[in-house]
Every structure is written in structure tokens, then in C-alpha cells.
Amino acid sequence: MIPVAEFKQFTEQQPAFKVLKPWWDVLAEYLTVAMLMIGVFGCTLQVTQDKIICLPSHEPRENLSEAPCQQLLPRGVSEPMGDLRELSGLKNNLDLQQYSFINQLCYETALHWYAKYFPYLVVIHTLIFMVCTSFWFKFPGTSSKIEHFISILGKCFDSPWTTRALSEVSGENHKGPAATTAGRATVTVTTTAGPGKAGEGEKEKVLAEPEKVVTEPPAVTLLDKKEGEQAKALFEKVKKFRVHVEEGDILYTMYIRQTVLKVCKFLAILVYNLVYVGKISFLVACRVETSEVTGYASFCCNHTKAHLFSKLAFCYISFVCVYGITCLYTLYWLFHRPLKEYSFRSVREETGMGDIPDVKNDFAFMLHLIDQYDSLYSKRFAVFLSEVSESRLKQLNLNHEWTAEKLRQKLQRNARGRLELALCMLPGLPDTVFELSEVEALRLEAIGDITFPPGLSQLVHLQELSLLHSPARLPFSSQIFLRDRLKVIRIKCEELREVPLWVFGLRGLEELHLEGLFPPEVARAATLESLRELKQLKVLSLRSNASKVPASVTDVAGHLQRLSLHNDGARLVALNSLKKLAALRELELVACGLERIPHAVFSLGALQELDLRDNHLRSIEEILSFQHCRKLLTLRLWHNQIAYVPEHVRKLRGLEQLYLSHNKLETLPTQLGMCSSLRLLDVSHNGLHSLPAELGLLQNLQHLALSYNALEFLPEELFFCRKLRTLLLGYNHLSQLAPQVGALRALSRLELKGNRLEALPEELGNCGGLKKSGLLVEDTLYDGLPAEVRDRMEAE
């Protein structure tokens, strides 16, 4: 007999997963075990015992119109006594092998398929039920999230910080348990004392004194170093896990799909079992042409297990009905309430932690399942979603948590390849920071009242410093140390007058990034006069509300290579001073309120990149003058109000990248096709109705963005751009895609969403570099592609 334990692997799960199994899943699991036992029992009988026993019929051939077994059924009138056979039975003259042959032949031909395969069908259906129930625990895309969630949940539940945080908040809300008890005792004494106010006052003082002893020290101070470190790590894990899980709803979707599949399976099983259960018959008539072998052609057979199988079938149908009811209830539970949203309102009211955020998507769905098991889990888990709780823990453990070893673990390479230590929102600056002599970049954000100690001189490799909303004081000795060592500094503050003066004395500085506003009562460029001392400055980034370019910028014109002015919409005037920046290679004038391209830009012979994003440009007739900027490779005119592109654009033969998105273009000039070096063209988010055929002349074009326009068709010449790798056509009015798209063999990303397409050309299969992940299109259109095309796109 096959032991049921052999099927354990189909439903085997980690014991910790039980917290994500509501009562209906538990009931369904027991039902599947019962159904599996029925199937295994039936299969065992089917294999180990005779399946069918047949005897030949002695009726004459002229009477074979009656079923061979009909004479065995009860009759109303008995046959004449003279026709009785001997009590010893009829002589059939058949040997054992002939009987075995007849039994097998009649079993295969005469017995109904449902009666033959009933136990096997039960086993197969039950295994499918078992797989559907546990599939989301096994599927890689969901099991990893579940395992991670269960791991974090258990640690949060058992963490000492959870209990201490809840006790601390509860103590603050109620002014301590002892205070509450004492207050109640005082009221009791006052009520029962009767007259005599002096006696009442003395008793109240006696009972109030222990209150001070009980509340000192607070319970949270009992958290030791190890427990504090573990709680801090949990906060970080919960943050990362929340960001990761809230991005999608794969768990919720998978659970719905497997439940729907179980319901469909249940309905199918129920229907065909009710239809065919009557086919399990004790007597089976069998007619086979075996006269030449056995001498008989008609047999009466006995299905030995028919009675048992019929009872097992009705029992199985009963279990399936109960199983189906649980599945239907699961669907009701899934759809009658928003399971993709989870509110901690009751927890916030109970604990007093008002900053616990609500969660969504898969995070919310798992918490709803947890509540079906025990709502205490979500309550204790919520402690690690509270920023108030986290800040208290950080404040408590700052002195013994930020060891030099732990700070070294936070070291990582930044975008410039420097070894950087980033600290954010700490109550202070740990002294152990200055023990990390290997640090090359230090980033401090939202850390108040920083005073660099003399130990700063230990950071002998420090080259980059970022102070983001972190005012800092630097002693004179440390200024001398940083003067020639520091290469990059970033300052972000509310007003530029808050920039420390010692910044302008760093004569070895190569990059200066300032962000802040000029106060209206102070001259706009007054605080930047000391830039003249920065003789090695190559990069200057200024984000402010300046009305003109600071005069000190021209003082570093001889060596400045990159200038970025972000004005947040304030109009920038008096740009003639830019002509002096002869060595400038990159210029960004973002949100400066410009209505025309500044003429001073055309004098920058070394300019390679120009970015005029978020301005008020309406006309770019001056684009002809860019021919004097012979080294210009990238021109960004996006996020403006440009209505047309002049035909002078043909003069920019060396231009490689042109950004014209988020404008008001309705047409493109045919001369754009003469920009033979163009590799990237972005004209998305405009009002284009058509494209010039001359775009097909751009043989070096690799990226073409046409999304969010009003294009109704594409010129066939466009597909002559054989080097195209990215073609974005989403959200237009395209009704068809020409088969010539198959000529774009290098295409790896194609966006077609939001159009009026009815089908996709099968020639997409010729785009060898195009995979399913790179094809952005509606699912119905993708499913309409030939199977071989879809298989090739989905292949690794």
C-alpha cells in the first residue's frame, strides 16, 4: 500500500508559514488529506485485487439481443422447473488463462472509464488541490518575500525593544502605571476619609511619594547594547522590506489566482462526478468477438469493487463540496474588503504612536492574513514602522552603537568612486567617525549643531564633504588641514548667507555645489564675492533665486569647465558675463525664466553640452548661431514652450543628442534629417501629427522618443534607421505598425502602449534583440502574436 506520507512533499512548508494560513486554508488542508486517503485506498484495492470477474453467457445467438446479464436480474415470473441446470453449475470448458484473458479484455472494453479510473482521478485531483494551496509558498517570486516577512515578523515580535517601546509610550500617555495606581488610590482615600481635610492631605502625600521611586529610571534605559543593535538592524530591515514589498501585489494576485483555480477545479470535479457516479455498476455486460478463442462472444461480468467504489465516490463528492465551500468563502473574503490596504488606526490609538503609517499592496495583504492568525503580531510589528520609536532608539544607543567597526560597514563607493561615509538624521556626530582614516568622502545630512573636533585631522584621505541642512563650525586648525586637501564640497541650506565662510578659503577646491536662497534684503551676489580665492575651481553649481549671474563667477572663468545655474523659476537677466567663460564645456541654465536662447552662449567655443530645461522658450530661431559652437554635442531644450523648429537646424551636423520633449511642436522640419551625426532624438510629449520622411536619413540614430503625441502613421522611411535600439511610440493615435519594423534588427526596446493598434505584425520576430521585457504593449496585442514569435521573445 502506498503510504500517504509519500505525498508530503507536495504540501511540505516551513512551520513558521502557519501564521499566513487562515482557518479556511487549514480546513482545506485536512480535507485534502482525507480525499487523498480515499484515492490511495482505492488505488491500492485496484492494484492488489481482481478488478472484474466474467462468465460466458449460454444464451443462444438468436437471443443475444438481450443483455447477457439480464437474466441475473430479479424477475417477476420464475422459469419452468424443467429447464433447471444441475446444482453443480454450467460446464464452460474454459481454462484459467482463457478466463484471465476474458477478464482483462472485458475490463478494458466493457467497463466504463469512470469506474476504471475513479481512484486515480481522486489522487490526481487531490494532488492538484494540494499544489494549488501551497504554490505561493513555493513559487520563487512569492516565497522569497514570504520567508523574508516571516523572518522579520518573528524578530520584531520577540525583540525586547518592542515591549520597551510599547511600555514607554504607554507610560507617557498615562504618566506611568505607578502614577495611575497612586492616583486611583488617592481618590479612594479621599472618598472614604469623610470629613477632615488635613487627614486627607496627609494620606495623599504618603501615597504619592512612591510614584517618584517607581518611575525612575524609565524602563527604556534597561535596553543593553546588544539589544539596541538588534533593534536598530530591525528598523533598517523593515524599511527596506516595506519599500520592496509595497512596490507590487504579486502575493495578492497569486493567492487570488490559486483560489480561482481551485474553485474552477471544484466545479469541474463536482459536475462530472455527479454525472458519472451512476456508471459504477455491479454487473457489466460484455460482448466481444472471441468465439474462435473461447467459444463464446457474450459474457456477464462482476465488477468486484463497484459497491465500495460507489460509496467512496459519494464520500469523495461530499468532501469536495465542503472543500468548494471553503474556496468560495475565500473568494468572498478576498473581494468584499480592500485587502491591498491596511490601516494601523487602532494600533495608533492604543499605543499612542501617531506616526505609524498605513501600508498597501502585498505588505497590507500579509498583515491581513496575520490578523486571521493573531492580531498581536501586527501590533508588535507596527512598532518598527514608527519613526518616533526609531528616533528614541537611535538617541538611546548613539554613544555605544556607532563604533568604528560599524561605521566601516557603512562605507561604500559613491558615484565618483570615492570611499564615502554617509550619516543622516543623527542627533549628533559620533566621535568614532574620525577614527576612519580611510574615508575619502563624508556626507552629513540633517545633523544639527556640528562642531568638527581637532580629530578631523585624522581623516588624511578626505577629499569630499557634503553638508546638507547640517550647519557646521570648523576651528582654525581644521581649516588649515582642509585648505589644500578638500576637492569637492556640497552645501545645502535655507539661505545662502548660512554658508560657512570657511568654505571660501579652501583654495584647493575643484567643485563647489551651493543650494539655498538669497534673502531679498541682501544684494544677490554679495555672499559669493569670495569665490575669487578658489583658483582651482572647475565645477560650480548654484541653485538659488539669483536675478543675475554672480560677478565672482567670471573671476574663475579661466579654469571653470562646468556651470550649473538652477533658479527655481526666478528670471535670470544680465547673462553677458558668460562670454568670459572661455573654457566652459557644460552649461546648465535650468528654470531661469529664459524666453530666448542667450546670445552669450554662442560665444562659448569650447561648449559641448547645453541644457535649457524648464524655461519659457517659445522661439529658437537663434539656433543657427550654434554653428559657431563647433564642439556642441548635446542640446537639451526640453520642458519649454517651443512651437516649431527652424530649418536652420540642418547646420548642426555635429550634434549627437537633441532633446525637445515637453514642448508644443506640431511638425518637424524636413531639414532635421540633415543632422547626420544625431544618435538621440527626443520629441515626446508634444503635439506631432506626422513625421517627415527625411528622418530616415539619420543613419546613426539609436534612440527615438515619440511618445505622447498625436501620430496617426509612421513614414516607411523611418525604418531605414537600422541602428535604432530604442523606439518609443506609446500613447499616440497609431492604428497599425508597418511590417517594415522587422528591418530594425538592433531594436531592443519598443513602446506601443496607448495606441489604436488591433494587431502587431509578425515581422517583429525579425528584431533579434527585442525581448518580451523590452516590448511595452497591451497584453491582448502581445497574445495575438504567433506562438513562435512569443516563444523567441520569451527565450533567455
Image (cartoon, helix red, strand yellow):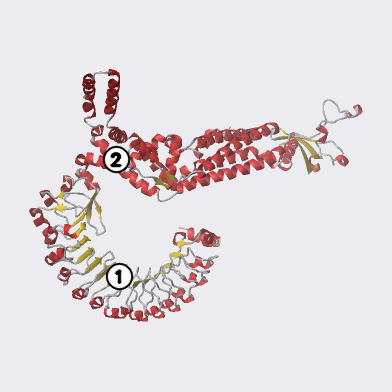
Residue at 27%, 80% (x, y): give it.
Answer: 628
Q: At which x and y percent is residue 228?
A: 26, 38
Residue type of the residue flagged with mark 2: Ser
Residue type of the residue flagged with mark 1: Leu
Q: At which x and y percent is residue 398?
A: 21, 41
Q: Residue 13, relative to residue 658: is it above or below?
A: above
Q: At which x and y percent is residue 301?
A: 76, 35
Residue at 50%, 38% (x, y): give it.
Answer: 11
- In the shown orientation, is residue 41 left or right of residue 436? right
Figure label count: 2
Residue 131 visible, this orientation: no
Front residue of 155/472: it is 472
Q: Secondary structure at mark 2?
A: helix
Of the numbered discs in the image, which one, if any, rests on residue 169?
A: none
Q: Secondary structure at mark 1?
A: loop
Q: Quadrant of the N terminus?
A: top right
Which residue does the numbered mark 1 point to in the structure image? Answer: 612
Which residue does the numbered mark 2 point to in the structure image? Answer: 389
Front residue of 531/526: it is 526
Q: At which x and y percent is residue 109?
A: 73, 43
- CA separation, marks 2 and 1? 45 Å
Front residue of 20/518: it is 518
* Quarter of the rendering containing residue 77: top right
Residue 576 visible, this orientation: yes
